[in-house]
Amino acid sequence: MLLDYHTHTHYCNHATGTMASYVETALARGIREMGFADHAPFMPQPWMKLAATFEEYEQYVSDVLRLRQEYPEMTLRLGCECDWVEGKEKEIETFLAAYPHDYVYGSLHFVRGFAYDMQEGIPGYQGRDLNQLWHDYFDDLARMAETKLFDILSHPDLIRKFAYQAPGDPKRFYEKTVPRIAAAGMAIEVNASGLFHFTQGPYPTLDFLRMARQAGIPLVYGSDSHAPEHVGCCAAVCQALAAEAGYTAWTRFAGRRRAGELAFG
């Protein structure tokens, strides 16, 4: 049996297809446990309209709960992908507690105001100190984990998305970050979307995963699909990478608690 915890919906304004079509595609591909994890209405740059509004999020939750009844053959989880916005921790905590989430991804799509992983942000790389940028990214990743607002860190080295890599061995950043994530009790995700970016490989790297495994950090898989045909995308590649790092199972979540494991098949 397969699972996929990272799928989006039309409510985020940059995904296509009906929510039912995601579930049906998953079932056709042998996936019997999946979760929607659409973007919560917390973004450092809300004008980009990359997340649901508060009103739309209400409808998103209702839709997931309805689909759960319509597709009893699917274990359908209610997830959320929420950006950490420094200074809004109390608002985020209150918002997340208002809904029956099974898990919440913490995401970092901005580094101190810089939209580093968006096409609109590419001009901002010009003249930027990449070593400092990567330092700030991984420090913020750890600080986000330390808020304990979230359950899983999504695509934990998304800073690799474009061709703007810090010089030298990136393990020096991982070595400072992974222990802090472990101490915060967070899980992380192997995210398939990196296979379609400059990185041409899942997020995170094998070195990051090896350190995470040694630190005892649980792991989930997410396709990060923004269209139904991407559900379960490259799951075998992601599982092989995780296995090479020493993992043997995906962690499952329900009610914002770990709910056992699904052994690699």
Image (spheres, rainbow, N blue to C red):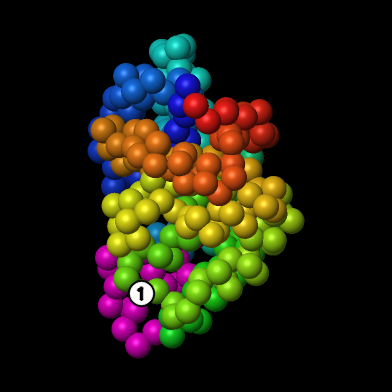
Residue 77 place in picture, x, y as percent: 51, 28
* Residue under the point 28% across and 29% down: 18
Magenta residues? 108-128
Q: Which SS type dominates the magenta stretch?
A: loop
**Magenta span includes 118:** yes
Name which residue type carries label 1.
Tyr
* Residue at the right extreme of this rendering: 183
In the rendered view, would you say 46 is above or below 241?
A: below
* Residue under the point 63% across and 43% down: 218
Residue at image mark 1: 164
Q: Is residue 4 visible?
A: yes
In the rendered view, would you say 21 is above or below 50?
A: above
Q: Is residue 129 left or right of residue 179?
A: left
Camera-side residue: 265 or 144? 265
Q: Is residue 105 left or right of residue 123?
A: right
Camera-side residue: 85 or 161? 161
Q: Is residue 80 visible?
A: no
In the rendered view, would you say 71 is above or below 155?
A: above
